[in-house]
Amino acid sequence: MTTDESPPTRAPRKTRRLLLWVVLAAIVAVLLAHLLGDMDLSGQDRVALIRVEGVILDAQQTVEDLKKFAETPSVKAIVLRIDSPGGGVVPSQEIHDAIKRVRDKHSKVVVASMGTVAASGGYYIAVATDRILANPGTLTGSIGVIMELANLEGLLKKIGVESVVVKAGRNKDLGSPFRQMRDEERKLLQAVMDDVHDQFITAVAEGRALKPSDVVPLADGRIFTGRQAKDIKLVDELGDLDDAIRVAADLAGIEGKPKVVEPRRRFSIRELLESQVFGKLPRLDWPSGVTLKYLMAF
C-alpha cells in the first residue's frame, strides 16, 4: 500500500535553530563591544569630550559623565563643549560643583569650549573649569537670575472663571497666577533672587580670580561677545573646539595629538519609547509657579 504523505522535513527546525544562534551571537557581540569600549586596552593618554547642549534642565547625565572620566586613568583632561543659554539654577550649580570635584579630588584638567552661546547657567558651568575658550562671536555672560510669573486674573474674569484657594500660611500661594502680587510678596521674592544672584557673582569671582566688586558691574544680565568677554577677563582665550582640546592636552602634559573620547550612550528601550511615542504627545504638566533660572532671556 502506498501513500502520498512524506515524513516531516527537518529543514524548518534547523533554520529556526540557526536563526536563534545568529541572534544570540549578535547579542554577545553587542555586549562585548560595550565592555571592550569601556575598557582601556591601549594605555594611551586621552582627552574626554563632554557636550552640554540646549537648556539645562537636569544635571544627572553630565555629572555621571564627569565622574566616569574622572575615575578613568587614561583620561588626563576633560573638555566641556558648552552650547547653552543656561537653565535651572540647581542643575547648573550641580554641574559646576561636579567640575570642581574633578579638579580638586582627581587633579584632572577641565577646559571649557564655548560654542554659539554659553550664557547664564552655561557661563556658570564654565567658570568652574581651569581655562575658558570662546569663539569671537560666542554669546556669553548674562550673569543674572530670572523668574517669570503670569497673572491670569483679568483673563479669568473675562471668561467667568473664579479661583478658589484654601491655604495655611499667608505666603503659601506666593506667585499665584490667579491674583495680583502683593508688595510684601514681591519683596520676599526679590530677597530670594538677590541671594541666588549673589551666589552667581561669588562663583564667577572665585572661578575667574576676580574680586566680587569687579564682577558686580558685569552682573546686570547683559551679554557679551567672546571677544568682549576676553577683554574683561570673563574668558581666557579665543579659539574653537580643536583649540580647546589642544589647550587641555598641553595643560595635562599629553605629548602629540591626543586621542579624544566621548561618553558612550547605551541603547535604552525606555528612552526610545519616550522619544518616539510619548515625546510626540502633548504634556499636561501644570507649571510649578516660582522657578529660579540662570537663563538668558530670548
Image (tube, helix red, strand yellow):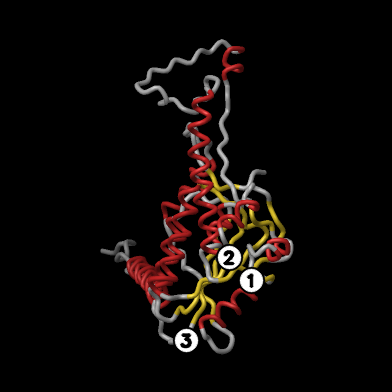
**Residue that label 1 marks:** 241
Q: Report the amino acid beneath label 1.
A: Leu
Q: Nearer the N terminus, badge 3 or badge 2?
A: 3
Instruction: Pick whichever, 233 or 86, lies toward us.
Output: 233
* Left or right: 102 in relation to 47: left
Q: Report the amino acid beneath label 3.
A: Gln
Instruction: Pick whichever, 254 or 225, lies toward us.
Output: 225
Residue 42 to residue 111: above or below: below
Residue at 57 percent across and 41 percent down: it is 146
Residue 159 to residue 79: above or below: above
Q: Quadrant of residue 135?
A: bottom right
**Residue that label 3 marks:** 44
Q: Position of residue 32 (x, y in %)?
A: 38, 75
Q: Position of residue 219 (x, y in %)?
A: 62, 50
**Residue that label 2 marks:** 81
Question: Which residue is the extreme one toward the top?
Answer: 160
| Alpha-carbon span between mark 3 and mark 2 | 22 Å
